[in-house]
Image (cartoon, coloured by chain):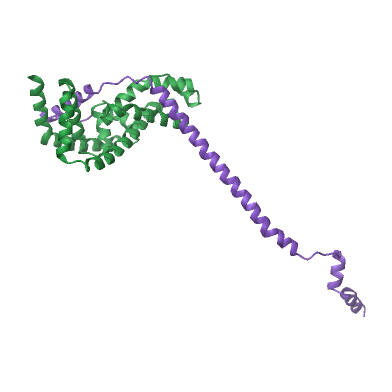
Chain colours: A green, B purple
Amino acid sequence: MAMLVDFEIIERARSGDSAAFNQVVQAYRKRILGTIARLIGRPEDVEDVGQEVFLRLYDSLDQLRTAEVFEPWLYRLTVNAAYDYLRRQRRRQESRMSDLTEQQVMLADAAAGGKRDVEDQHRTRVRELVQSLLGRVSEEDRILLMLKEVEGLSLKELEKIYRVNENALKVRLFRARQRVLKAFEAEGLDRASLEREGSGS
Amino acid sequence: MDRMPANGNDGKLDALFAQYRAVFPDPEASANFMPGLWQRIETRRSANVNVFRRLAQVCVGATVALTILMGMVLIPRFEKMPVYSASYVDVLENDHPNTYVDIFKGDIK
């Protein structure tokens, strides 16, 4: 990860300079919103979670020890906000799904699917498949796996974000990936090959 | 990651993650992002100020109530206490009448 603002601007934001804080947000918001989008998988809620991240940043900026640790700090806030969102979402989903019969859910999906064009459908299928595979692991492991596999963060970077030693991270990542891989082999491969056939024809 | 050599399915899973990455490119924030953020910051800030104001009001109220209570308990007690019109020497003299003189006289004998 490359720093997107000078340390001096972060220092100024840390000392309460609103203009400097605006500069920091403007520099990082695209990257953070992208990460959030991929972590939570719901484009409609990305800005809300993004604002929550920068709100937490504003509240805790004075606790930042040095500007050098700013990025891991920001990523930690992002991870926490995404985690809170996913937990809330899971609770909400459980109560919502219990109100609908399976047939109603399928009908709703079909109706929504009919309106989308082919590319949209492809995006939705990839999104749903990955979300379903990641549903096999805990929210914490899901986020960790996404940061590693999708965001492409290195173990060193993850170590700084999680403040956990590299070996512990490796073990967690390995186990999470194995579970996702098992689920992928069980259901995802069929869907993925169907998807390829569908997009090929 | 330091991973074991990928088998076929590992590679397919990696490809799926890469597809997922492509499905969600970094989005541009809407025009409402910054105003919305500052509105939330201001709301949080004023909520914190309100909490402190409420806390201060509670503290002041409790202090006033405690002062009144202490006054109600202590003032009647002070009022009931005996008032001495005699001096300290008079009180001593009343408590020990001529003792010192008697002892002194006894020593001479």
In the shown orientation, is residue A59 left or right of residue A129? right
How many callouts does the rendering have?
0
Q: Could you tell me residue A80's position as x and y percent?
A: 34, 35
**Residue A200, placed above or below residue A192:** above
Quadrant location of residue A87?
A: top left
**Is any atom of residue A178 visible in this view?**
no
- Determine the image quadrant of residue B55: top right
Please tell me which residue lies in front, B64 or A74: B64
Question: Where residue B100 appears, x then y in whole percent?
Answer: 88, 73
Q: Residue at x 71, y 61 (%)?
A: B76
The residue closer to the viewer here, A36 or A15, is: A36
Residue shown at the point (11%, 35%) measured from the top left: A187
Percent across and percent down for residue B9 are 12, 30
Figure check: B64 above or below B19: below
Q: Position of residue A189 (x, y in %)?
A: 10, 31
Residue A157 located left or right of residue A99? right
- Point 31% across, 29% down: residue: A45
Image quadrant where one finds the N terminus of chain A: top left
**Residue A8 relative to residue A78: left or right:** right
Above or below residue B19? Residue A167 is: below
